[in-house]
Structures are given as C-alpha cells and as structure tokens.
Image (tube, helix red, strand yellow):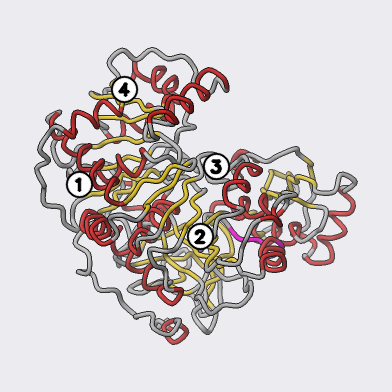
Amino acid sequence: MDKIWLSHYQKGVPHDINPNELSSLVDLFDKTCQAHAHKPAFINMGTALSYQQLHDDSTAFAAYLQSLGLKPGARIALMMPNMLQYPVALFGILKAGMIVVNTNPLYTPDELTHQLNDSGADMILVLANFAKTLEKALPNIHVKHILVTQLGDRFPMVKRTIVNFVVKYIKKMVPSFNIPQALAFNTALAKGRQLQFNPVPVTHDNIAFLQYTGGTTGVAKGAILTHGNMVSNVSQAYDWIRALDFTEKDVIITALPLYHIFSLTANLLTFIRSGATNILITNPRDIGQFIEIIKNTKFSAITGVNTLFNALLNHPKFTEIDFSHLKLALSGGMALQKSVAMKWHTITKSRILEAYGLTETSPAVTMNPMYLESYNGSIGLPLPSTDIAIRDEDNNDVPLGESGELCVKGPQVMKEYWHKPEETALVFSPDGYLKTGDIARVDEKGFVYLVDRKKDMIVVSGFNVYPNEVEQVIGMHPGVLEVGVVGVNDDTTGEKVKACIVKRDPALTQEQIIAHCKEHLTAYKVPKIIEFFDDLPKTNVGKILRRALR
C-alpha cells in the first residue's frame, strides 16, 4: 500500500520515531522522576505519591529484590488492581533488570497456577484480598518468595490503619488465608531502604514484561515484550498525541487496570513521560463511586473500552462530571459502537478517539488522528514506524478496500511467545509480519476499518457475518443497553446469528429487535435467536466475552 496513510498524518507527527531516544523504560522512568520530582505521579483514594517518592520507593524495592539473590531476568508476578503499590513495585522490578509478569487478580487458582508455572515466576506480590486464591494454588506452584500487601499500605499511617481495618473487618473483602512464608510489602520496602541498590545495565534487548494474552481463545500465552518494544510504543503514542500538548499540569483518569496492556502503556508509561498525574480508580465497576471521584476533577484525558464509556453514559450522575478540561478520550480493547460515540459527543461536546492494538504489539498499532471531529468507524492510521498489510489465507496482499487479515510489522511487535516456538511460528509470516487474527480493510486514505476477529466470524450458508457489524446495528436501537453477538450451530445453514442483549427499555421485545435489524442488515445477518440477560460476561477490562456467550 506504499504507506498511503502517511499523507494523512496530523501536522507535526513524524513518519518514524527515533529508536534511540530512550534506551529503556528505566531511562524513561529516571528522566521523568528527575524532571518532575515534586509533582504528583499517582493519586489513589485521595493520597498522592510524588515522582520523587515513587523513585525512592521503587529503588528501595529494587534493592530488596537484589538482597534476595534474585538476578536480572528473574520473573516477578504482580497480582493487584490499580493502587499505589503497583507502580512502585513495577518500576522497582524494571530497575533491577528483572521481568514483570502482570497477573489478573480475578484469576482462579487453576489460571494462576498456569501463569506462575509457565512464566517460572520467582516471586509474587499479591493484594491480601486475593491471597486466598494464591493459597489454593500453592501446592502446585514453585514460587520462592511471596509478598502480601493491603489496600491502604502506601497511605499515611492513620488513613492506612482505617482503610485496612474497614476493608478487612467492616466490608469483609479479605477472605481468610494462611501463607506463613509471606512477608508484608511494607516490611520489604523498609528493608530495601537500609540497603544499597546496585544499578544494572538495561537495554532495548532486555525483557521488560511477560504479558499474558487474555486466554479468551485458549490457554494464555506469555508475549515477550522487551524494553525496546515498550519504549518504541511509548514514543509512537507520545508523538501521535503531541499536538494536544500534555504537560505536568495534566491529570489522567486511569480506570482500566494497569496490569492490562492498554492501560499499562497508555496511562502508566505514555502519560508519565510528560509528568502528568494518574488518578488510579481501584474499582471502576462501581460507576457511582467512580463518578464521585472524578466529577470535580479537572482531568485532561480518560481511557476506556466501549462498555466502560457506555456504563458512564447510562448512569444518572454522568452529567455532573466536568468535561471542560478534557483533551482526549481514548477507546481501545474492543470495537467502539457508533451509538456510544455519538451519545458521548452530544453530552460532553468532545469525541472519543478509537485506537487498536493487541498484547503482542505493546499494544498500539493504529490510532485516529487528533484532527478527527466525529466518529468515523475507523480504528485510525498506522502509527509512526509501523507497516501493515491486508492479506488473504495464502499470505497474499488483497486489493485496496477489500477485507483480509490485518498483519503488522514495527518496533513495537513482540519478540516471541515465552517458551512456545510452535505458537510463535504460527503468528508470524515468512516476511516477518505478525498475523493479528483480525479481519480489516483499508480505504484510499490509509484509514483502517476493523471488520471482526477472524475466529469470531460467523458463516451462514457460506456467507460471512461479522459480529461487530451486527452489534453496531443492534446497539443503535434506543432500547438496548449492551449487546453481544455470536454464532451457534444450525443443521441447515451451518451457523446462525444469536444476539444476547441487556435492555435499557424493559418493554423491549424480540420482535422489535428483529424489525430493527431487517431495516439495516441483509437477511442472513439478521439474528435468528435473541435472548435477554441482566448482564453479559466480560473480561477484566470490560470486553464482552463471546466465548462465554457461545
């Protein structure tokens, strides 16, 4: 396609990044902390952690890790939601030249066992609320060191005592557990402060993260993301949003969990480069409390997935939020529905820009330009230093405008899957492109339109039906709150379309949905089965789980 998208870049966005601008995430971290030492880096539940405090605490944690005899390359698992301990531990691990293994706190004991054994984790830091899961997994894992933290551990003493007491004894959110060998995180930090940290060389080639794929399509695999991958993606994203002029005065709402690749790169890494402040939302599922936290905050950016934006829009207190300082609302992780984008624009007078990426690409591949004024249904243009191809089943490029598998090449693309050479070989083409498994098309300006997941495609009597398309149509019905579309087996047509819907209007009927679909879809795309539910199964970041629907 001869990079036709370059001529439609925002003014000032370079065609390529400078690969040597940052030598590692440690380089990024140290420079930021030095430049913005006394500015707040993170705020959680009203408590701020300055960049200087973050640097000092992370260095103490790095020294503690070294004192255990752990060497560069050791894998350290982090199992906690958004809280101050997370960035402290993460940057401490990276400073020591070790590898972060992000772990979903909602994992079952079996899922946790798989990830810890597959990664060969040497240590795990877990929030006490989820330590019971770890206890159940202990007989089957080989982790040498265990640290446990409580929600309020990085708060001032009085607040820490109250928060930890309320969480454990009043709200009863900490199931009883018995892990005698576990050490308190605060104790580890105290020990680290008495030790000398010995800096280690960290370069582009060192592994920063074993970032496990969501596991929604099979057993989770660890994508090897190097410091080079990560700083490249940070530079790509930073150059892309440079026109919005983010500075140390800006405030970012971080509701998506930092252990997820989208929030990890977009919020934790990209925005701290400008010295901005991240407000960490520990439980974004409590939309009412979420709104209370942010409604009087002069925030500049918010990231989310379609379901999070939709949930906010449908809460009665949404209009109490002050959007007057908003520069960027960024959507990723799943398709942004037109109905959500339009309603957001109507109420907030701002637009949600859609981006696209995946775990294997650190994650950003494409993003809509900042000059976009309204929803266009696209996932944007390829980022600087990124090349894409749209290919058929035989790895041949398809004509411009036609659909095929989206394939990606760039400095943000992972090295390989951890200890899975066969799986790695399957996702890379002979010429080095990562095969995303997503069906897309590109228009004459280079804008990419995601058609659907290759594996989610429904085949009705030989015709391809893409769930995203059907979901977009159903989502436009005023009586629909949420919708997920899947294919189910059919003796006559092979598969038929099923829509799983959460109502906004209690009076909504199946017949109304079918009539609505017939107005906008050809006959074979119209759902043959419609079921109503109180809620739909979702991943940890709110992406609807089609596998669970099936």
Residue 438 image label? 2
Main secondary-structure element of the magenta-colored stretch: loop
Task: State the CA–CA distance, disc 2 to disc 3.
Answer: 18 Å
Q: Amino acid at mark 4?
A: Ile
**Residue 54 location (% of width, % of height):** 29, 46
Q: Is residue 76 visible?
A: yes
For label 3, count other residues whose C-alpha is less than 10 Å away and answer few (under 14), some (14-19) or many (20+): few
Q: Is residue 107 above or below residue 27?
A: above
Q: Quick one: 423 or 253, which is closer to the camera?
A: 253
Which residue position is annotated with label 3? Answer: 539
Q: Amino acid at mark 2?
A: Asp
The numbered mark, 2 or 3, whose residue comes first in the sequence reads 2
Quadrant for residue 420, please give it: top left
Residue 141 image label? 4
The residue that appears at 41% across and 44% down in the rendered structure is 259
Task: State the CA–CA distance, disc 3 to disc 1.
Answer: 31 Å
Q: Does residue 347 appear to the left or right of 272 in the view shown?
A: right
Q: Which residue is most to the bottom?
A: 7
The magenta segment is 335-339
Q: Amino acid at mark 1?
A: Lys
The numbered mark, 2 or 4, whose residue comes first in the sequence reads 4
Task: State the CA–CA distance, disc 2 to disc 4.
Answer: 35 Å
Residue 95 image label? 1
The answer to whether residue 338 is magenta is yes
The residue that appears at 30% across and 28% down in the rendered structure is 185
The numbered mark, 3 or 4, whose residue comes first in the sequence reads 4
Q: Secondary structure at mark 1?
A: helix
